[in-house]
Image: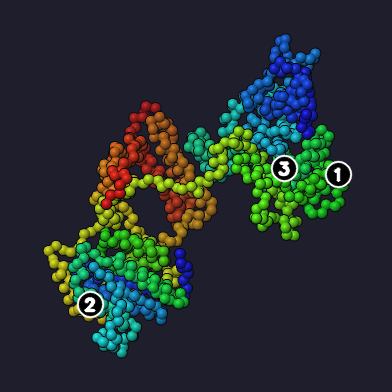
Amino acid sequence: MWEAGETVTAQGVAVYRKRPGILYFTNRRMAWVPDGGLAPTVSVKHDEIRVQLVSAGTATKVTLRIAEFKPEVAHTFQFTSSNAMQEREVIKGLVSVIIHDRLLRASGGGASSANGTPGPSGGSPGASSVMSDVSTPGTPKTPLQARMGGPGPAGFARRGLNGAAGGVDVEMQTRRALLAQNRELSLLHTELVVGKHISENEFWETRKSLLRNKAAIDQQQKGQSSAWLDLKPQTGESNDVKYVMTPQVIHSVCQQYPSIKRAYDQFVPDKLSEGEFWKRYFQSRFFHRSRSGRGANEPDDEIFDKALEEDEEETKSAPKRIKLDHINRLVDLSTTEEDHLESYLTPDGTMNAGKTKESKEAMPLIRRFNRYAQRVLNSTIGPKRPSTGPESLDMDGVERAIVMEDLQEQKESSKIVLNIQDTRRYFESQGGDMKSSKIPDGVNPADILKDFYRDYTSHEVVLNKPFTIPENTFDTLMRNVKSNRAKLLPPKDGSQLLPAHLYQEALSCHAAGNEILRHFWASTSMDKVAKHVRMIESLKKIRDENVKSLMIQASSLGTDCLDAMKMMLKPMLNGIQKALKHADSRPKPLVRKLV
Amino acid sequence: MKDISTSEDDSNLLVMVIDTNPFEWEHPSAPLKLNEALQHILAFMNAHLAGRHDNKLAVIASHVGVSKFLYPTPNEPIPGGKALTKKDANAYQNFKVVDDAVLEGIKRLLADPKPTLEEKDLGSSKIAASLSLGLCYINQTLKLDALGHIKPRMLVLTVSPDSSSDYIPIMNCIFSAQKANIPIDVCKIWGEDAVFLQQAAHITEGIYMRPNDPRGLLQVLMFSFLPDMFARNYLYLPGQDQVDFRAACFCHKKIVDIGFVCSVCLSIFCSFSPVCSTCRTKFAFQPLLNPARRLGAKSGASNPGSPRPSTPTTPSQ
């Protein structure tokens, strides 16, 4: 009646929908079996339990109500045995532990991704999404229990409150994370906020998109890594070899070697503890076989040797024919194979792998990788759903399977012809400003031609006389060349002209100045006068103090340095000048009101 | 795209297009006469031929109404008959042949007034035709060449303004030159900037020059256009990089920065009109007001409608 590895923790005689039966609480689910029945009618896995309700202690009926996530149903069980209350309390306690664990895992700080660890989910097909762990083979309770500070429902009520107030905390965390990651931002932050130019909130007001992005990234759960897992030991100061097994690692190992997973299900947590199991694993031949080709010195280990045998057997032989459930049975040719046996076509034997000697050795490995990849895919997106009965006889489904869009005749979409009148005018206007012909009015073209011919033939073209070239031609040409060259060369930027620390200071001054300018222009509306005034003060301060000091430092290092510094800070100074001019020209009465 | 690697061993084919538009050269405001200009041009041609023993040259005259090959002379008359000029023992024979062919060819062109006067578009020379002739000649030479070491380029010496009716043909030539990796250099000896040729030089990676003083033509030619393709990899050469790509409105032909564009035929107008004048599309909605005034202010579309064509199905004409 139970799955492999499932054990009953508690049970009680309960009535469900007026039928008597027994309510079981196992390590995987809650199940109710009617009297005389063989299989559970109601089965609610641990993670599907949303909430439980109990009847009041003084009520006559002792009931327990379990509500699920989906479908949104609730089951009510009424305990009818002699010690109904105890049974119910026991089961209630177990269920509340389950709910508490789940809440602990789900809530609590989106920033820390450790919370999102999916416990090792079984590789069984039909596993639902990663987050809700289905049939966890003994989810390692130790890490979670360590985190569980206050036990009992009181604990998680507090947690619920924290969740609401956690909004502000989350934002602070995001801010801190952003500052830690982005060095420029943190420099700007220290300069402005610590230097008391701008308040913290104002600083982040203009950077809302950054905060939003970071929060979104942090809340995303990373899916399962699909890399082939290679467990490396951590050699600490002491000489003993240490392997770290987190739930993720366990999950990966189980996915890679289903025989290990089977062994795990069988033995943990009932017969062996987790630690024991993994200790034996690392000592076994199985582990070392995959690490280095020869693991002959390992002691025999019954569990793992069996696992080893199973594993080798699996990969030696080719897999069985895959059942393709999603083909519409009306068009499935394999069903009528028997009618077509005697064709003169031999089946294709060209693309079979594993015929040559080298590929024979590689085949088990390839098979293992393929299976692993398939399992990873299944656990992430789920297998293809097999088609249900009535759908397979549907004619639309048949059409969908047969008709290929690319082979259909394409209908030409009806077009409207572009109709350009006077194409000449259309094309001639592409050329920019046109000048009309240069023939002066009143002169006959034929005359021009005659004059031209006469001029041409009268003077002979001689090449042995020296040429008279005006002097400035060469200078013009050289200037042209130099300007072209200057355009082609990469522009010299300040980092090459100034020493490093001075350059950094100039950068930060520039960034701070620009930030303040931005706030200045943003606060020109009527309701931000105080901030506006503050910005003006800050601008003046930056201009008079910071920039001046930078200039003095630069000039002490030479005029080149000073020029470079001036060039670097020029745009910012321009901006400050414009801003102050604008502030002066604004009507003053507003300021007077505040005073 | 052809392989554009250049090497020292390449011989160069220079195709020159000389604009002999009489209405420009004979204009009273012309700073240079054709004779004088030809002096500079011939010296430049000789310099090109002198660069390598296997450098090749072709000269095309772009006249009003006609475009002719000056060198190599298209039809050899009976050899020996009608002696060109007396053989000069002091002149290098290769140079002399070219120079004489060019001068004679131009003379013959100018002697015949017929094609010039027939041209409807007086005042514009046939640049497009010359470019096509040149490109075909280059193609022919490249095909005939056995070794494949010839690197062609074109040089256009022009004085006339752009001819508007030639826009499409010139653009076609430019694109085929670009495809064939043939740079088109342009020297506008005097006058305003020729926009089409500027674009030609820009697209084909050639050099566009407009010297300040036409009397220094030879120096400009030698400085900018003499280096061949291989040498251009190592030299900074003068040239005007800024090309005037601005659009002109269709109604007044003045340059616009912000205007109205018909969504059907993409013609540009400076002011709104309910019917597009080129494609007859009706615009049935109220336009936004003067864009210059409304710049910066947010404006939602008042009555967005789609333009309805006047003749939906029947293709007219």
Given this view, does label 2 or label 3 mark the residue nearer the observer? 3
Give the amino acid at mark 1: Asp
- Left or right: B191 with respect to A233? left
Relative to B254, residue B137 above or below: below
Image coordinates for residue A251, horizontal then vertical, percent: 72, 40
| Residue at (74% x, 23% y) in the render | A32
How packed mark 3 is, by other alpha carbons closer than 10 Å (few <14, some 14-19, many 20 or more), is: many
Chain letter for mark 3, please.
A
| Residue at (41% x, 31% y) in the render | A528
Give the numbered dot on residue A255: 3
Q: Are marks 2 and 3 in contact (CB under 8 Å)?
A: no
Give the amino acid at mark 2: Lys
Q: Are marks 1 and 2 in contact (CB under 8 Å)?
A: no
| Residue at (42% x, 66% y) in the render | B181
- Which element type, helix, strand or loop, lies under badge 3? helix
How packed mark 2 is, by other alpha carbons closer than 10 Å (few <14, some 14-19, many 20 or more), is: some
The residue identified by callout 1 is: A301
Asked if both marks, 3 and 1, belong to the same chain, the answer given is yes
C-alpha gap between disc 1 and disc 2: 108 Å
Give the amino acid at mark 3: Gln
